Structure formats: C-alpha cells, structure tokens
Image (spheres, rainbow, N blue to C red):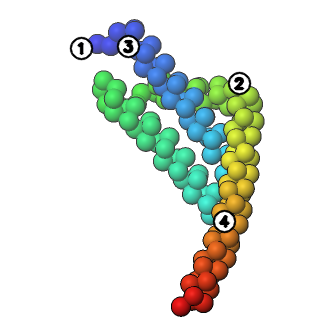
Amino acid sequence: MGRTNAREALALLLASLLGLGAGLLYDLLRPPRRAARPLPAALLDLLYTLGVGAGLFFYAMSAGDGRLGQWELAAALLGFLLYLHLLSSHILPLIEAAARFAAKSLETLGNHAKIFAENQKKFFKNLKDCYIMRR
C-alpha cells in the first residue's frame, strides 16, 4: 500500500497550511501578550504551544501511517516562516487595530455600565424613600 504523488502533495499542502495557521495564531496572540503582565503572557505562550502542538498531533494522527514525517514537518515550518516573513507585516496591523478597537469598546461599555448602575442605585433609593414615606 504505497503513497501516491498526489497524496504526498496533499499532505505537504496541508502541512504548510497548518504552518500558516500557526503563524496566524501567533499574530492573534501578540496584542494580548504585549498588554499582559509576565505571568499571563507566559500562559498565552503556553496556550500557543499547546495549540500548535495539538494541531501537529492531530495532523500526524490523520496521516496514513500515523506519524509526522520529516517532509511534512519541514512543510509546516516553511508555511510558518512564509507567513511570518510575507503575510504578517500586512495582517498584524489589522489585528492590532481590531484589538485596540475591542479594548476601547470594552472600556466604553464598562463606563456605560458603571453609569447605569449608579443611576439604578439612585432610582431604587428614591423609589424606596417614596414607598416608605407613603406608608
């Protein structure tokens, strides 16, 4: 039961796509890592390592012989490096802009929630005062 050239090419293509995905995940975790303190940043590094390791593991288990070959591993590394050197400079600014927008939106939402809570506190206090005075 040999492997055909088409299956080999597909395996290498999938491995390189896995490498591209690893690079994208790396860029997605960059903004929170930069904003985090050392311990949460280390936890994000651990999350990245576990995610990429799990991806490589599941890729290897789906292969015909159940192991990750050297060429597939090299293709995954090539995909990762191609992403970092060709695509990251174009995609990372978009990810950072989205992270800034999300942080500003969460800050604004938190401010509105605080104002809402203060208004509700005043409203229910006034309602309680009105109810007690009527009795």
Q: Which mark is residue 116?
A: 4
Quick one: label 1 or label 2, which is nearer the N terminus?
Answer: 1
Q: CA distance from mark 4 to mark 1?
A: 68 Å
Position above or below: 112 against 98: below
The residue pinned by badge 1 equals 1
Label 3–label 1 contact, CB within 8 A? no
Indicate which label's residue lies in the foreground, 1 or 2.
Answer: 2
Indicate which label's residue lies in the foreground, 2 or 3.
Answer: 2
At a point 38% along the width and 36% down the height, the residue shown is 58
Residue 127 position within the rendered picture, expressed as x and y whole percent measured from the top left: 60, 79
Q: Quadrant of residue 60?
A: top left
Considering depth in this image, is 16 or 31 the residue closer to the camera?
A: 31
Residue 61 position within the rendered picture, expressed as x and y whole percent measured from the top left: 33, 33
**Would you say 120 lies left or right of 54 here?**
right
Question: What SS does tag 1 mark?
Answer: loop
Indicate which label's residue lies in the foreground, 4 or 1.
Answer: 4
Query: Residue flagged by tag 4: what amino acid is it?
Result: Phe
At a point 35% along the width and 9% down the height, the residue shown is 4
The residue pinned by badge 2 equals 86
